[in-house]
Image: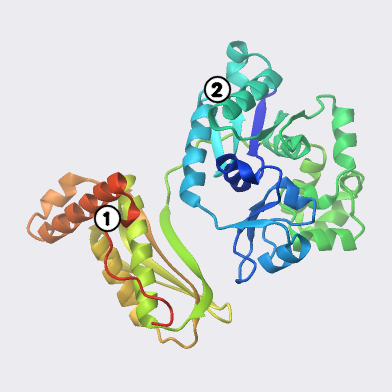
């Protein structure tokens, strides 16, 4: 039996949330990202802005040149994450098999719920209606018998629609054949250039290709992958999310920074966020890692084990600052980040085995959890570590 797979993709998600929450923005070009007078890029933009050629990852200055009437808005990730949580709760009402791809898209395997909700087209319509009713946000849904085709279908459904891939093989192959090779999953800029220079411009060129020639061009494994996709074949299952293997947070500065005191403060803020996420998920960490990107875009990482598994902010800050202190500021810093790895479940019994050694750790953890509770109740700014610095201070 063929599976029934849906791919749900929220339309211009960040911009749609902004237009929903501020009705005066509806119908206007909205760009979410860095302001045009600062270095940075577009995170996403409304369809009104896309008509001017604005697109994600474009430098904000270029976006302003293309669409000077656009409203630029700084991203509010907390609001977008809150909306995402509610969206996924809706999806889980229709199938237990939900695979998140990002904050605003997911695959659903609805093969086992057709008797309950009807055919895939009906489920897609119900999903979109429910999301619209509960969140007042538009969503596009693609329908197919595998993940690759469902993802393609959702692109054809945009904006705010439903598209089902043809079930007849001849029709499907014809539809795929008219696509450019760059639309195939796994084909990036480099591989696309290699394929196009060799005369593979359309998917139909792959469908008619001599396999040995393609193997010489891109290798046996990728050649097989391309040929399978060109005929709409994809054996990947919809997979439930696995536990995080690491937790990290980084920040890119509007201007390069060479003030170590300011960088230390920024690093501590990131450590607090990482620690909060650790505790929220009931995890402990064994390794701390920092990331530094210099003004010339060279990037380094440094890591070290904690003396014991930890989840408190103090331990993360101390080791992160120690790792950073070992690095000379050979130039100004563009980006700084911190992460923790080798995560395990919080086991109170393990802590009890070393009661004396870990008494201080337990105190630190208790203080950190108290801070979490206060911030949850009164907001992130309810407790601050100290005065905020500017890069020039």
Q: Quadrant of residue 327?
A: bottom left
Depicted 366 relative to depicted 64: above or below: above
The earlier-in-sequence mark between 1 and 2 is 2
**Residue at horizontal 55%, vertical 22%?**
94
Image location (x, y in percent) of residue 276? 32, 53
Closer to the camera in the image, 50 or 232: 50
Residue at (43%, 79%) from the top-left corner? 391
SS at badge 2: loop
In the image, 3: left or right of 306? Answer: right
Left or right: 126 as drawn, with respect to 261: right
Residue 150: x and y, percent? 71, 34
Residue 242 location (% of width, % of height): 46, 42
Relative to 132, does residue 354 appear above or below in the rendering? below
- Residue at x 70%, y 48% (from the top left corner): 28
Q: CA distance from mark 1 to mark 2?
A: 35 Å
Q: How many marks?
A: 2
Q: Quadrant of the C terminus?
A: bottom left
Image quarter where the N terminus lies is top right
Residue highlighted by disc 2:
94
Residue topped by disc 1 = 311
The residue sitting at the front extreme is 24
Q: Residue 230 in the image: x percent, y percent?
A: 82, 42
């Amino acid at each position: 039996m063929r599976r029934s797979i849906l791919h749900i993709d929220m339309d211009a998600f960040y911009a749609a949330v902004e237009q929903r929450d501020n009705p005066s923005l509806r119908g206007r070009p909205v760009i979410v990202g860095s302001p045009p007078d600062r270095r940075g890029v577009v995170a996403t933009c409304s369809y009104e802005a896309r008509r001017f050629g604005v697109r994600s990852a474009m430098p904000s200055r270029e976006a302003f040149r293309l669409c000077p009437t656009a409203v630029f808005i700084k991203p509010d990730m907390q609001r977008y994450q809150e909306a995402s949580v509610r969206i996924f709760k809706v999806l889980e009402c229709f199938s237990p098999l939900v695979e998140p791809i990002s904050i605003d898209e997911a695959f659903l395997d609805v093969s086992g719920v057709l008797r309950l909700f009807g055919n895939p087209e009906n489920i897609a319509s119900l999903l979109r209606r429910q999301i619209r009713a509960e969140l007042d946000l538009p969503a596009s849904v693609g329908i197919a018998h595998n993940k690759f085709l469902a993802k393609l279908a959702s692109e054809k459904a945009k904006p705010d629609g439903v598209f089902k891939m043809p079930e007849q093989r001849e029709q499907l192959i014809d539809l795929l054949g008219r696509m450019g090779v760059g639309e195939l999953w796994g084909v990036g800029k480099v591989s696309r250039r290699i394929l196009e220079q060799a005369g593979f411009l359309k998917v139909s060129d792959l469908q008619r290709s001599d396999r040995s020639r393609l193997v010489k061009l891109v290798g046996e494994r990728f050649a097989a992958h391309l040929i399978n996709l060109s005929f709409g074949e994809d054996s990947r299952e919809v997979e439930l999310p696995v536990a995080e293997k690491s937790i990290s947070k980084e920040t890119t500065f509007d201007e390069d920074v060479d003030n170590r005191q300011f960088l230390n403060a920024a690093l501590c803020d990131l450590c607090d966020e990482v620690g909060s996420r650790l505790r929220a998920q009931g995890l402990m960490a064994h390794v701390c890692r920092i990331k530094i990107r210099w003004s010339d875009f060279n990037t380094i990482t440094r890591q070290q084990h904690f003396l014991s598994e930890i989840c408190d902010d103090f331990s993360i800050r101390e080791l992160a600052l120690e790792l950073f202190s070992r690095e000379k500021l050979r130039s100004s810093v563009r980006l700084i980040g911190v992460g923790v790895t080798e995560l395990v479940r919080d086991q109170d019994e393990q802590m009890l085995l070393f009661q004396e050694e870990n008494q201080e750790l337990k105190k630190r953890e208790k203080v950190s959890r108290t801070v979490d509770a206060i911030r949850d109740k009164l907001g992130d700014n309810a407790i601050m570590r100290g005065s905020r610095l500017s890069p020039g201070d």
